[in-house]
């Protein structure tokens, strides 16, 4: 493995010191990757120069990688400029809401016995028409469950309900879905239950084998799709993320050892622009450990929060770009990583305005394009990471 990214990081850090006023002192033996101040995350001397005119999907494809993004039916339908840019930049689409049981104004499961595929079908057709690969997101999750779920689902009928859901939804789109997020966010070590599992309705209803069951059902319904376990909070060097990495690794080991048809780990990568604790070596080691289980890896929902960054837009954009490039340079060094998706493409449409808004009420800027569909430094950062990535 090349050590270039380490060198660059160190060099950028040192360059950055020049501009720092309230610099933190480094303790003896302390890695310079750790605990550096927010000012050093914004390094004005760092350039994000990109050569050529190619789109993100083309740059990724040159390296045997896939670039894609999340989008929603309503935004693609109502905003033709967005749809156009989306097709230009992305080689893969993941639906933000339409394949969840019930999310926003979309109801895939209006009731226990029926399905409403209108929006989901539209997303699939859009992706086919425009040569986009497609990710199914998501079959089993503790969020986005319909209102009727709690009242009507019990230990007697839960297995049948899940079986029918997976058979029907996965079966409908056989051959059209590159990968399925079969189970989303099943690990939460802080819940202090068996094997780091999250306390969810599915665990209560079906017991600890529900993850294995979901993967087996998905594999039966579509033997050709890549089946993914997807989770967040795997990125940083703190005790919470470390516990989560360990618990996810043991989950994956356990599933592989009992022959569960699982093919990949999805790392959501919802990063924070103000986080001080990305540790390239620890994250890289985690990726190697996952790859050694003969699993592929997808970065599935990347964005960089600027909720706690200062108002200065230029500073925010530099900091966010740096977080993208640092993280992706390490991630793409691992050849098991096959795809990078951002959770949205333009700041015009990002869940973070609602879920993690800024105190000063100014719009957040977590994605590669701004709200006017113009390239930001984050776009350059992703392009550079693809350009520097080893070929698959
Ligand atoms: C989010 C969507 O972006 C929101 O619009 C929705 O209301 C809630 O879910 N992890 C996931 C995604 O796996 O499905 C979430 O998407 C973001 C966090």
Image (cartoon, helix red, strand yellow):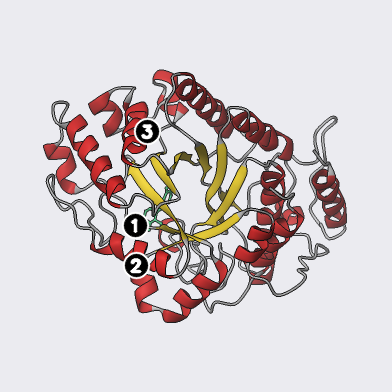
Q: Secondary structure under badge 3?
A: helix
Residue labelled 1 has its Cβ within 8 Å of some atom of ligand 1: yes
Q: Residue at x 49, y 57 (%)?
A: 343
Query: Pointer 1: residues within 10 angstroms few (<14), some, or many (20+)?
Result: many
139 to the left or right of 338: left
Q: Nearer the viewer, residue 61 or 90?
A: 61
Q: Is the residue 48 above or below the residue 221 in the image?
A: below
Residue 46 x, y percent position in the rendering: 80, 62
Of labels 1 and 3, earlier in sequence is 1
Q: Nearer the viewer, residue 188 or 339?
A: 339
Residue 202 in view in this figure: yes
Q: Residue at x 57, y 39 (%)?
A: 296
Q: Residue at x 78, y 60 (%)?
A: 43
Q: Secondary structure under badge 1?
A: loop
Query: Pointer 2: residues within 10 angstroms few (<14), some, or many (20+)?
Result: some
Which of discs 1 and 3 lies nearer the camera? The answer is 3
C-alpha gap between disc 1 and disc 2: 8 Å
C-alpha gap between disc 1 and disc 3: 21 Å
Q: Which residue is mark 1?
A: 97
Which numbered marker is on residue 73?
2
Of labels 1 and 2, earlier in sequence is 2
Q: Is the residue 337 above or below the residue 43 in the image?
A: above
Q: Is the residue 120 above or below the residue 246 in the image?
A: below
355 to the left or right of 17: left
Query: Pointer 3: residues within 10 angstroms few (<14), some, or many (20+)?
Result: many
Residue 144 in view in this figure: no
148 to the left or right of 292: left
Q: Are marks 1 and 2 in contact (CB under 8 Å)?
A: yes
Which of discs 2 and 3 lies nearer the camera? The answer is 3
Q: Which residue is mark 3?
A: 215
């Amino acid at each position: 493995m090349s050590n270039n990214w380490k060198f660059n990081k160190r060099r950028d850090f040192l360059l950055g010191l020049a501009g720092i006023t309230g610099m933190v002192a480094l303790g003896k033996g302390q890695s310079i990757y750790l605990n550096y101040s927010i000012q050093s995350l914004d390094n004005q001397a760092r350039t994000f120069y990109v050569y050529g005119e190619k789109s993100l999907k083309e740059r990724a494809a040159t390296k045997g990688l896939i670039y894609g993004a999340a989008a929603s039916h309503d935004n693609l339908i109502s905003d033709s400029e967005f749809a156009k840019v989306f097709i230009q930049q992305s080689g893969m689409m993941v639906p933000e809401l339409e394949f969840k049981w019930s999310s926003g104004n979309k109801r895939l499961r209006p009731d226990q016995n029926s399905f409403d595929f209108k929006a989901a079908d539209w997303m699939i057709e859009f992706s086919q028409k425009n040569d986009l690969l497609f990710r199914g997101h998501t079959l089993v999750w503790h969020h986005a469950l319909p209102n009727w779920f709690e009242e009507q689902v019990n230990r007697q009928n839960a297995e049948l309900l899940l079986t029918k859901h997976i058979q029907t939804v996965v079966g409908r789109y056989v051959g059209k879905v590159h990968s399925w997020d079969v189970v989303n966010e099943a690990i939460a070590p802080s819940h202090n239950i068996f094997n780091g599992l999250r306390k969810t309705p599915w665990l209560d209803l079906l017991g600890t084998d529900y993850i294995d069951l979901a993967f087996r059902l998905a594999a039966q319904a579509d033997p050709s799709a890549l089946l993914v376990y997807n989770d967040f909070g795997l990125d940083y060097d703190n005790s919470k993320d470390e516990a989560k990495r360990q618990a996810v690794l043991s989950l994956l080991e356990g599933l592989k050892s009992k022959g569960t048809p699982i093919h990949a780990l999805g790392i959501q990568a919802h990063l924070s622009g103000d986080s001080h604790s990305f540790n390239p070596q620890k994250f890289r080691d985690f990726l190697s450990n996952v790859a050694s289980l003969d699993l592929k890896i997808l970065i599935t929902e990347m964005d960089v929060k600027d909720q706690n960054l200062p108002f200065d837009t230029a500073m925010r954009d530099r900091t966010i770009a740096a977080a993208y490039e640092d993280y992706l340079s390490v991630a793409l060094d691992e050849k098991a990583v096959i795809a990078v998706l951002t959770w949205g493409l333009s700041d015009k449409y990002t869940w973070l305005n609602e879920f993690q808004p800024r105190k000063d009420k100014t719009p957040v800027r977590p994605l590669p394009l701004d709200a006017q569909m113009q390239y930001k430094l984050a776009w350059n950062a992703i392009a550079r990471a693809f350009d520097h990535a080893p070929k698959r």
